[in-house]
Amino acid sequence: MNEIKEIRVGESILGLKDNLVKSAILPKSSSELERDVQIQGNVNIEGAVYARQLVIDSGPAEFQGAVYAHNELHIKNDASDQIVFKKAVASSGSVVSILLSGKALYGADINAASVKLKNCFVAGSIFANEIQLEDSIVLGGCFASKELTIHNSIVGTFNAPEVKAGGCNYLLYPTAFSVEPMACLPGTEFYNITLADLGSLYKQEAEKPNTGKIRLDIEADSQRTVLVAEDDTKTLLHSYSVASRVLVSDMVNLENFENHFLIISAGLGSQILRTYSLHKADGSKSEDLTLNNIAAFFFELLRGTVQISDLSGAVSFDELRQKYM
């Protein structure tokens, strides 16, 4: 890997391959505002990046600073290896990472007009007009001002006027919202994993009692909610939550859950000064809580390699009596 300490080129296309870039790639004149950046593999950029269009042919590639692509950030479908963005990614146009074999890890938020992801992991949230997810994980929320399409994915929560879904999907937080009723393809499944013991699964230990995933019935678990603003403007939302039928949640000591460590560590990976891990029951330590390790764990959940037990939401009378008497 050749080290480049400062970018001093003004060509319309800046191509990088087998390079360690120690500086930022930022325009220094109006002519450089129209410069494209093309990543051809084995590239590590330590500073921030600005490009009219950022095209990534292949990995491995790592962007340690914030990235802004004015027109488009595009990772080619056949890109191999891993592409990592440590900080926020934004575009006035689109962010497209529809990967067939490689993976893209976004360590912070994505903000663009259009976001299309496949085989991607996002440690933060996505803010866009239109969001399309397939075989992807978003630990934060998917906030679309127009339409959200989700297929075989894990998301923290979502809020969009229109939501289309297919495949098997998971929600990390108790509730999600849409303006119009959610449109689902036949066979679509949703599970809420707010009460899943992800910390124990990450440590490869047995799950705690009264924990697991809860199947979400899109029809039965949908409620109409009216939000009233200060000017008396009313907004009608459909909320999707299992809270109304989960009595067992009161039987779980949520303070002992370590789910938040996974979510927080993934989002703050580039800001914390040391690497943390979880303590196992035998006193040993889990795998380090790094962006790579946490992403690998959630991909195993998504593919079913790591199984989450089912939680019925029912508890026995004896358990209730022990809890409250």
Image (cartoon, rainbow, N blue to C red):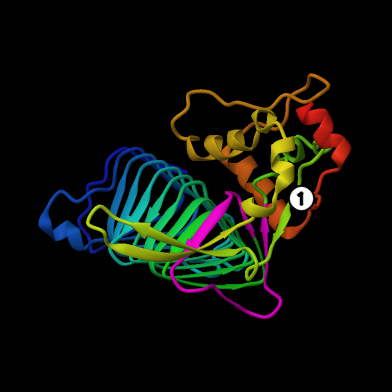
Q: Residues within 10 Å of mark 1 (few under 14, many from 20)?
A: some
* Coordinates of residue 302 in the picture (x, y in percent): 69, 57
Instruction: Tell whether 87 sits left or right of 254.
Output: left
Q: What stretch is highlighted in magenta?
A: 170-192
What SS does tag 1 mark?
Answer: loop
Instruction: Tell whether 85 sits left or right of 249.
Output: left
**Kind of residue at badge 1:** Gly
Residue drawn 57% across the image and 26% down it: 275
Instruction: Tell whether 26 sits left or right of 196.
Output: left
Q: Is residue 74 visible?
A: no
Question: To which quarter of the image does residue 207 belong?
Answer: top right
Q: Looking at this view, name the residue that lies furthest to the left.
A: 30
Give the answer, above or below, for where 104 lies relative to 48.
Answer: below
Along the line of sight, which residue is nearer the eye, 85 or 294? 294
Q: How many marks?
A: 1
186 within the magenta span: yes
Give the answer, above or below, for where 209 lies relative to 278.
Answer: below
14 within the magenta span: no
Q: Looking at this view, name the residue that lies furthest to the front.
A: 325
Residue drawn 46% across the image and 50% down it: 18
Q: Can residue 62 be seen in this view?
A: yes
Question: Which quadrant of the figure contains the C terminus?
Answer: top right
Q: Looking at this view, name the residue that lies furthest to the bottom.
A: 186
* Coordinates of residue 167 in the picture (x, y in percent): 67, 71
* Coordinates of residue 174 in the picture (x, y in percent): 58, 50
* Coordinates of residue 266 in the picture (x, y in percent): 54, 39
Residue drawn 40% across the image and 43% down it: 87
Residue wearing tag 1: 313
Along the line of sight, which residue is nearer the eye, 303 or 97? 303
